[in-house]
């Protein structure tokens, strides 16, 4: 198994992740129900929320999940009910979210394409950072 396969296996298919957005010199963060598919992250939100307005103004976002820090580019890809793969995965992992929000007219699916993923690990009590550069398709581990 190569380092990228190990990364995606460890991240898994879904999770509650913290999404951070920024616009107009204001950074905000919130927990989101996120699904993972084909090397991308997906969640849904209302077009009426601050995070949506921030993403429209500045599409660079960050996700934090367990030991992972993920920097990426976010875009609106449509309404949840129009995206069957999204609805199928969300129904499997977050059925309450689907029932509550997916059919609302202002709901949109956000797709986050990761650019850089970092994690901290310890080997023999020595800290290291791991970095996956998704654009260059490179991996490195550095002692801290």
Image: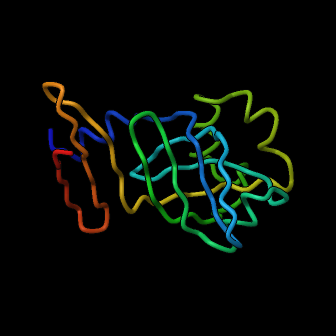
Colour pattern: rainbow
Q: Residue at 84% of width from left, 56% of height from top? A: 106
Q: Quadrant of residue 116?
A: bottom left
Question: Would you place residue 59 above or below residue 1 in this image?
Answer: below
Q: How many marks?
A: 0
Left or right: 9, with 27 as reference point: left
Q: Residue at 31% of width from left, 61% of height from top? A: 134
How far across and down, in percent of the image, does residue 85 sit? 56, 46
Of 124 and 136, the residue lying toward us: 124
How far across and down, in percent of the image, does residue 72 sit? 47, 61
Left or right: 105, with 45 as reference point: right
How far across and down, in percent of the image, does residue 123 sit? 16, 29
Question: Would you place residue 25 above or below residue 110 in this image?
Answer: below
Left or right: 78, with 67 as reference point: right
Q: Quadrant of the C terminus?
A: top left
Q: Quadrant of the N terminus?
A: top left
How far across and down, in percent of the image, does residue 137 sit? 23, 62
Of 62 and 16, the residue lying toward us: 62
Left or right: 44, with 114 as reference point: right
Q: Residue at 70% of width from left, 66% of height from top? A: 54
Of 26 and 139, the residue lying toward us: 26
Q: Residue at 78% of width from left, 59% of height from top? A: 50
């Amino acid at each position: 198994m190569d380092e990228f396969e190990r990364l995606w296996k460890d991240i898994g298919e879904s999770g509650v992740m913290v999404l951070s957005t920024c616009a107009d010199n204001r950074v905000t963060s919130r927990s989101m129900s996120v699904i993972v598919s084909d090397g991308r992250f997906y969640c849904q939100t209302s077009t009426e929320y601050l995070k949506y307005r921030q993403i429209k103004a500045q599409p660079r976002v960050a996700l934090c999940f367990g030991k992972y820090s993920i920097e990426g580019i976010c875009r609106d890809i449509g309404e949840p009910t129009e995206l069957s793969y999204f609805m199928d995965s969300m129904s499997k992992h977050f059925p309450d979210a689907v029932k509550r929000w997916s059919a609302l007219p202002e709901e949109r699916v956000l797709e986050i394409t990761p650019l850089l993923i970092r994690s901290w690990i310890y080997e023999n009590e020595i800290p290291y950072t791991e970095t996956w550069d998704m654009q260059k398709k490179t991996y490195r581990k550095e002692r801290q």
